[in-house]
Image (cartoon, rainbow, N blue to C red):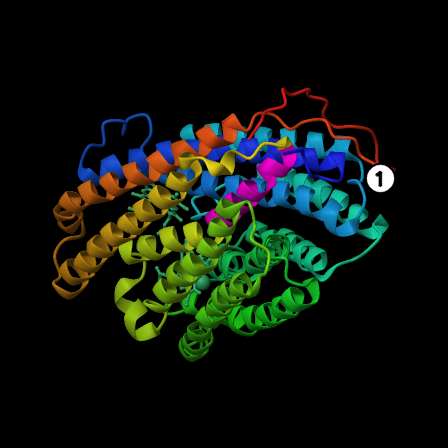
Amino acid sequence: MQPTIQYKTQKIAYWFFAACMLLFALQLIYGFILGFARMGYDGLHEWIPFNVARATHTNLLVVWLLTGFMGAAYFIIPEESERELWMPKLAWVQLVSLLLVGVVAIVGYHVNWWEGRKFLEIPRELDWLVVVNVLTFLLIIFMTIWKGKRKTTTAMVLFFGLLSAALLYLPGMITFENLTFDSFFRWWVVHLWVEGVWELIMGAILSFLLIKLTGIDREVIEKWLYVIVGFTFLSGILGTGHHYYFTGTPRYWLMIGGIFSALEPLAFLGMAIYALAMARRGGRKAPNRIALMWTLGCAVMSFVGAGFLGFAHTLPQVNIWTHGTLVTAMHGHLAFWGAYAMIVLAMISYAMPELTGRSMFKGWKAEWAFWTTNIGMLGMTGAFAVMGVAQVYLERKGGMDFLEVQESLEVHAFGLVLAAALLTLGVVLFIKNFLEYGLPVEVDSSSNSSGGGSVLATPQRPQED
Ligand code: HEM
Ligand code: HEM
Ligand SMILES: [Fe+2]
């Protein structure tokens, strides 16, 4: 199999994906620190206390997903726009600076340099560097689309999703003395990201993958993309209200948040039905079956994790009991996994053979990676569910002391860590598979690149399939 990428600057995506794998592995290490601490084995407490490990775990998650989205954009946009990336050298600078900011932030957390706002712990000084970094990325993507031969719906939705994600980072940078205000705007970032604009990014990548893997006409696939974007905004924007229950905001949020957030699963259900229907209709049998498995898996698991398990605690009558418990962690894990981790892994599975000219997706490793990660994550979700529900009954209904409850949950954390080990086995297989693909090969690009020369020149042994 020969490399099939048409534009040599698409290769920059490989390095974003490689960074992605590294950060993902690190995230899991911190996951285990948390898991063992939950079992009562908090031996690292003096050096890495639970709150530091937790912030590092979730921030690494967000950064590896964003790195994956950026890699996906650098791969997709040249193909959609039919031209090389604009200023590929700048994309390199952007990758290196992104990793630098990430390392500084993580080291900072370990020496107590952070802000205590869940998910947005990065100190304000570093926030500005993030802004510059993301602006650079958006400029490259925008200029490539702008100068490109065509402007497809998929590219526009992807760009709009990425741009809105950047803009929505700003409300999280305002300082408030008042906790209600502070939490009000924190959700503009956290909620409107995962239940708004990140869904557009996911929808666009899904659309790109379905076009490539099912062979169905772009017109059909992109028409549905509009419907999903519409549904996402209709429900997701006012759905923010499900975080405004009992936080000092006016009471009407109970009604608004409850109704609109209860509609949010429809966008995810829409995506699942759409992906499955397209795959059924698709005449072409994609040789890269694994990429299709991740793509369809993503569409289904995002509905289960975000839609179904989100709905489970979104009504105020339920949320009054479950708020901030391990029920939230149960939903948080499967939602992030199904929607965003899986779309990034789908994109990597699709892009690697194209980038390297090898077809490593045929072996058992790639398939086992898919099943063990997914079964492992479902197991973890189950363990969190047991812990969460027990916590609600013991602490909030039974009135047992908070710390006593936490101690009584330790036995269930054992199941969590076991399931996490299965997930980790799958991730190790995925990364091993990734490494076996080797580096991307130099490709003879027939297109004219006005943006600059080759990004990579790595000769690679040809290999038979
Ligand atoms: C892929 C999409 C989604 C992701 C990645 C996601 C992830 C998360 C995470 C990480 C949290 C904890 C946030 C925090 O406390 O700072 C959370 C909270 C919450 N999510 Fe989602 N979610 C998604 C979609 C949904 C949907 C569609 C619904 C409703 C149908 C929903 C309902 C909720 C609710 C009610 C909470 C608050 C829980 C509490 O009060 O402690 N989520 N979500
Ligand atoms: C080795 C595997 C993993 C283990 C053992 C693990 C364990 C944990 C634990 C114990 C927490 C803290 C819950 C608490 O507050 O007590 C946590 C938080 C979290 N983890 Fe993981 N995790 C793992 C992998 C992952 C993966 C792969 C994802 C995403 C795809 C993820 C997403 C999250 C999120 C979003 C939170 C915050 C949840 C919330 O706000 O309630 N974790 N994890
Ligand atoms: Fe939300």
Compared to 50, does 82 lie above or below? below
Q: Amino acid at mark 1?
A: Ser
Magenta stretch, residue numbers: 341-355
Compared to 128, does 151 lie above or below? below
Visible residue check, residue 322: yes
Instruction: Answer left or right for 184 relative to 152.
Output: left
Q: Residue at x 53, y 35 (%)?
A: 20
Where residue 382 appears, as percent x and y from the top left, is 25, 53
Quadrant into which the C terminus falls: top right
Visible residue check, residue 178: no
**What secondary structure prevails in the magenta region?**
helix
Observer-nearest of 371 and 175: 371
* Label 1: element kind: loop
Where residue 351 appears, as percent x and y from the top left, is 60, 40
Where residue 264 appears, as percent x and y from the top left, is 47, 70
Name the residue carrying label 1: 447
Observer-nearest of 302 and 406: 302
